[in-house]
Image (tube, helix red, strand yellow):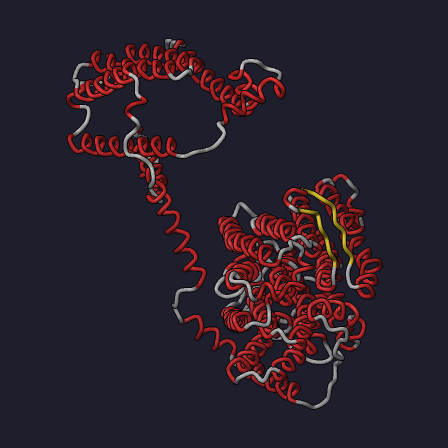
Amino acid sequence: MFLPLLLFILLGAIALAVSLRRFPKKFRRWLLAAPAGCVFALLAIHAAPVVINQGAIAFSLPWVPKLNFDLAFYLGGPGLLLALLVTGIGTLILIYAEAYMDGQPMAYKLFAYLYAFMLSMLGLAMADHMLLFFIFWELTSITSYLLIGFNHEKAASRRNALQALLVTGMGGMALLAGFILLAEASGTWLISELAQNKDLILTHPNYPAIMALVLLGAFTKSAQFPFHFWLPNAMSAPTPVSAYLHSATMVKAGIFLLFLMLPVLGGTTAWTFSLTLAGGATLLIGGIFGLQQVDLKKILAGTTVAVLGLLTFLLGLGTEKAVLAALIFMVGHAFYKACLFMTAGAVEHGTGTRDTTLLGGLGSIMPWTATAAILAAVSKMGLPPFLGFIGKEYTYKASLYENLEWLPLTVLIAGNAIILVLAVRTGIFPFLSRKKTETLPAGSHSHEVSWPMYIGPILLGALGLVLGGAPFLIEPILKAAYQSITGKSTLPEIALWTGFNRPLLLSAMTVTIGLILLKYHTQIRQMLNRFALPTADQIYDHCFNSIIAFANWQTKRLQSGYLRNYLIIILGATMALVWANPRGFSGFPLFANIQSIHLAELVIVILMIAATLIAVVTRMKLTALIALGVVGFGVAILFGLYSAPDLAITQILVETLTIVLFAWLVYKLPSFKNFSARNTQVIDVVVSTCVGLTVTALVLKSNSINLGERISEQLATWSYPEAHGANVVNVILVDFRALDTFGEIIVLAIAAIGVWSLLENRSKKPKAD
């Protein structure tokens, strides 16, 4: 019960966050962060030793046994790493958010949303059943929608939240389809058991479809090309949301899925090509986007996209060294990116702007914030002795080990060089460059923020420094994740210094190119912004607006308000479905057995046909009404002749009521001679004839099918012993079709209420003025 307990703690934290305002203000900050800190401590103290020594913690509880759907949780190495990042960084984010949102309306709703998102991410890290994984996957999309659109009074926030929900939701539907095919191919729904059946999956005919659908889910969640555009737009969320969702948690969900699927779907040419191509393109696109921006959060969003592309590229290589490099890089990125987002929010609080062209000389004004930002920026630049340097070194080691061609290696070097430029622009220039207080917004007064807003960033920045100098501190957790993914029992050595070698040479080359780009970054930004090529975001807008326009067009056509059009659409769709497989109507006689037709039945049918023709051609209202009555009563007589007295009585009652109502209303109808145009009448004749032929074919086909024992005989057999009723019809209506009958009663009741309300409104006379 340990794993569900963690989720229950966060579930209780949601209720706590909503009611936090009732507590004294001096306790709110600690009460808000306590549940997340408690879960992090339980994971670090209790779960981590078990996972490191035994491999995993599992829990399963039957939920829907008939569907083989269990509440199956499995905390392995990758899940433990993600869970620690989610809860550990989440604790610092909540402390930061309480101060950031101080005095703002609906702040406690934001805290509740953050905990709901944390719950979803933790469930994702621990879910073992693929359907349970999908449920938490979609919960992350829904909660991120609420967080991105938190400032719902702004049109941009609403639009960007909807965009993120649509893109990630589309990927979620693809992922669900991929999981269903994956379960069918492997014979299991448990993610922890998929790798055991890898050969079955790779040789299955549906492998290409499985891989494509799973990758579509991962790419949309982790903003890979061509779905990268939603993440920068999500920066309209409050800064604590950006620091949490788009650095350490939500965007890592897709990467986490790739980690899980690498032992299952990886190792093929299709996997390697898809991930390296998408990852490399995303790396460059994210970096170029960051170079074009001047807003701190938008620049950081660009680097987030770039790093996610780099991680996807490494997982595309799929080698043991690439997996280790991706794990190290992911941890380092989570630390420095969450830190830089929080310092960006602190700068905005302290100066009133996030525009890098207006910021400078803040180091002496905001010393604590500057310290945190510089620590994170140096790690992001990939300089020793930080964890970011180790991540970059092992990335180059994995690339050289694979003997990559010059093009992908060039992409890696260029991407890392651009990330260096953006790290300097976001974490160093605002604090150490020339003071620009004269360019700040009017009335702003630069000042240091309160300690809750810089304590978290300092801790994260310091962690990047400490773990870079002493990587053995995090080695056990990385080893557990590495073993789970690669199946290897030993972890390659993780060290800050591995000597003078080619990876170090590539690192030096990256720094040199980055410094050159940094010198001309203003000119590069201006040059890039001169290009007017359509962006992916603009293409999304065009597609979205086209879908809305098409929906409006088809709604006007299908929902015309004209009953005749509705009937034609319904009948036409029905005929299309019936005749979709014409071969299904082969093998039945075109005519019924004439010898089985009695004289009375033949006379009644002839009268009904004659009455139908009279109703169609007559111009007299009363004649048409009488003819329709003959048809209806003829049907009732046929029911009686075929031993269905209950249906016959019902038909007589309905037909009588219909004739009375028609007689009451028919004199208010317009003259028949101008009722329909000639082309309308022709269409009606064609549709009616086709429908009649279709129904006739269905009846003849049904008579030619031998269904074995009749259901009526079985119901008669069950009637008394099962339902204790001698009247078979009553038993069918009340017992065998109880829900159906209940639904019909509800419909009739609603119709009666509607009729009564109309009559009541009509009986009320308007009051005289």
x%, y% of residue 543? 40, 55
x%, y% of residue 215? 54, 62
The residue drawn where x is 64% and y is 67% is 263
The residue drawn where x is 32% and y is 10% is 660
Apparent side of residue 545 relative to residue 430 in the rendered image (left or right): left
The residue drawn where x is 27% and y is 13% is 630
Q: Indicate the quadrant where residue 628 lies.
A: top left
In this view, 72 is above or below 366 = above
Q: Indicate the quadrant where residue 657 lies.
A: top left
In the displayed orientation, state which residue is furthest to the bottom: 500
Q: Total label count? A: 0
The answer to whether residue 153 shows anywhere in this view is yes
In this view, 561 is above or below 197 = above
Apparent side of residue 176 relative to residue 555 in the rendered image (left or right): right
Quadrant of the image containing the C terminus: top left
The residue drawn where x is 42% and y is 13% is 645
Q: Which of the two residues, 147 or 657, is positioned nearer the viewer here? A: 657
x%, y% of residue 43? 79, 57
In the displayed orientation, state which residue is furthest to the front: 595
Q: Which of the two residues, 464 or 707, is positioned nearer the viewer here? A: 707
Q: Indicate the quadrant where residue 467 lies.
A: bottom right
The answer to whether residue 425 shows anywhere in this view is no
